Amino acid sequence: MGKIEWAMWANEQALAAGLILLTGGIVGVAGQFRDWEFAAYAIAAGVFVCLLEYPRGKRNKGTSVERTGQYCFTVCVKSFGPLTRNYYVRAFLHAAICVPGGFILATVLGCVCLGIASLIYLAAAIRGEQWEPILPRKESARKPVGESIKLPPQNPPPRPPAEMRRKRAEDLEAAAYVNPIAVTANDD
Amino acid sequence: MGNWIINHGLSSFILVVWMAINIFLFLWFYFFYDLGDQFFYTRHILGSALAWARAPAAVLNFNCLLILLPVCRNLLSLIRGSFMCCGRTMRKQLDKNISFHKLVAYMIGLMTAVHTIAHFLNVEWYYNSRLGKYDDLSMALSSLDDSGNTTFLNPIRSTTTTPTLLVFTSVAGITGVIITLSLILIITSSMEVIRRSYFEVFWFTHHLFIVFFAGLVIHGAGRIVRSQTTTNPPHNATFCKDRIDDWGKIQECPVPQFAGGFPQTWMWVIGPMILYVCERLLRFIRYMQTVKYRKIVIRPSKVLELQLVKNGFKMDVGQYVFLNCPAISQLEWHPFTMTSAPEEDFFSVHIRSVGDWTQKLISIVEQLPEGAEGPKMGVDGPFGTASEDVFDYEVAMLVGAGIGVTPFASILKSIWYKFKDSNPKLRTRKIYFYWLCRETHAFEWFADLLQLLEREMEERGMGSFLTYKLYLTGWDQSHANHVMVHADADTDVVTGLKQKTNYGRPNWDKEFEQVRKENPTSVVGTFLCGPAVLATVLSKKCVKYTDVDPRKTKFYFNKENF
């Protein structure tokens, strides 16, 4: 279990929590529940959490898989520097955001989910993980092909030296070619 | 089109049936609760949210029943064994079990969302009704108490509670929150990213399903959904709803009585739960069975060959087993295709070093002293479609691409054994084997196998039985140079085989032409284990080169997911 990056799971959990918070908030406002103001808050909080958690961070080991279209979110989140890079900040932020959700029924589930995500982020932070943005790889300079490849060859193709090429009478097997016509001394 | 029906027809049919059952259950229970007279008064307070909560509940019952079944792989193996007579297509469905498990899981997630939202609304409206925010009828219904000769309808009895408090003080509420939370955790840890990279998180969290099922079974025990019971004399709701003040005073309207519905979920899920417990027990028993090492060979390119012996182990060609090594990890089981033939008295796997489990296994084995026994191993299996059809064709074209070559080791060995023993089950007289890979690095052991077969066939004068061609699709200039210099050698420089390596992808037209020319009257079966793109190409070629004349060559394409 030592190589698990908790932040990856915390990210999935937080994104799910954001969506649940958002849905609960919409239900609360649409149903005009008592204390619907909390539901309205939950909508805003849900959207905020989703935006923050949508861009996946870069993994320490292995390939990082981006979510579709996350590049613009990555740029936004990156611009907050240490606030978003540090997982302690995220853990406490999520813990704080989730509290008002616990006051009405419709958002209580989102609150608990976000609380769990906050705990997982805390675990990630204690292990020293950080959020690194996934940026597009700069095209590595391909080995430039010299101009000379476009000219016809100047030298003949490489061959073993002439002594090896010449067929030796005692070692016909090792020769590099076979005579199409038998070459023997003309006896008659 | 015909090909699609053959390959996907049964799966699509099963999905359609499953969806139809879901829709039927949803609609049936929706109208049961939306139109039933016994819920007239309940609906007065809750509206259609009652039906919207109960309908998904029925679908959830059905899907929670289904979800445990596809993961009982030993049970599935048992079923597959008894389906040997009923055709390959039936058995192939059993191999798509995990896809079905995921589909059912999505449905459970969706229905849970609908069910939960509907119940949030229900609780809120019960609460409002209790506080008298609705009409007089609601007020009257909600004030019915569980005392004397009345029974309550509205589960909110006190006026000082809040919806949240009600949820946390009722059985249905607490269990609901707990199981929904378990479900959410299970889902987030099952996302592909987490599953592929941090399997243990996925596996441990998935065991929350125990909490899920326990809570699910108790969820209805509070009997919080109330319906009107028949009284003597009967209380006609449509007549009495406008005469609230007369309830209990006139004969047509005695005070209405209510009772909760009997919890039914346990009836749906108890069967699969028992089956699953048996499955885990069976896996544990299998794990405890002794597995002895017959031979351990470290092959080039960090490939480990393990030859194992286990009492009562019977396999078919192309199947796979799960291996567990407690010395590396108590809980991880990893699948490996078997590379031995059923005719051999042992079974073997070739393990490549791809992840940390395989790397650790290889390093443990490398550090073993000579002749020592390998680390304790648990084996579960065999699982997977048996590819018995290969033996039915007179001429077989086998195409293995990349790692897809592994089951062919088993198949080729088995064919060779059957051929040597003149096994009547083997109708094959000629095999064309095409091996496509980027580089032979991790498959040198397979080249060794081919060499062995080549030698044995030469000895018996049966050299024409097997024709194989190797295609290296990842060649570069240094390869080409190397080959140019050694062009005259008897055996191939890369594999040491008599057949020369070809570079690039095969020209299938030429290959099919050659097979047709050499076998003018046979039925040729083409088998592929490789990428889907290749499957489309090959199936098209099979159609193209099949002769209309029934006396001439016919090609049949089989794509197997070994």
Image (cartoon, coloured by chain):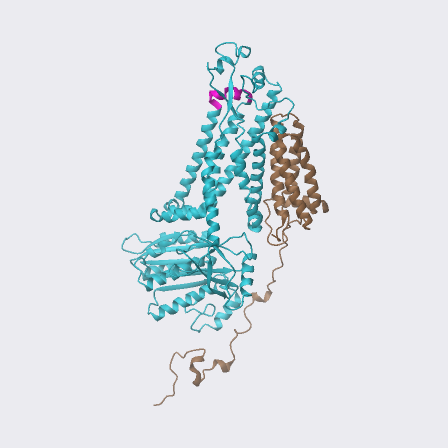
Chain colours: A brown, B cyan
The count of marks equals 0
Res. B173 visible in picture: yes
In the figure, B242 relative to B160: above or below?
A: above
User: The N terminus of chain B appears in which quarter of the rendering?
Assistant: top left
Main SS, magenta region, reads helix
Q: Indicate left or right for A96 with B491 as reference.
A: right
> For residue B37: magenta?
yes
Q: Indicate left or right for B365 with A178 as reference.
A: right
The residue positioned farthest toward the right in the image shown: A82
The residue positioned farthest toward the top in the image shown: B250
Quarter assignment of residue B464: bottom left
Q: Residue drawn 52% across and 19% down? A: B41
Q: Residue drawn 42% across and 82% down? A: A172
Task: Estimate the x, y position of residue B225 in percent, counting from the top left.
Answer: 52, 26
The residue positioned farthest toward the bottom in the image shown: A188
The residue positioned farthest toward the front in the image shown: B148
Res. B355 visible in picture: no
In the figure, B274 relative to B145: above or below?
A: below
Task: Estimate the x, y position of residue B248 in percent, counting from the top left.
Answer: 52, 12
Task: Estimate the x, y position of residue A20 in percent, counting from the top left.
Answer: 60, 36
In the figure, B102 relative to B435: above or below?
A: above
Q: Nearer the viewer, residue B56 or B211?
A: B211
Quarter assignment of residue B69: top left
Task: Estimate the x, y position of residue B296 in percent, counting from the top left.
Answer: 48, 64
Quarter assignment of residue B11: top left
> For residue A33: magenta?
no
Q: Residue drawn 37% across and 88% down? A: A186
Q: Nearer the viewer, residue B382 or A99?
A: B382
Q: Indicate left or right for B487 with B519 as reference.
A: right
Residue stretch in magenta: B34-45
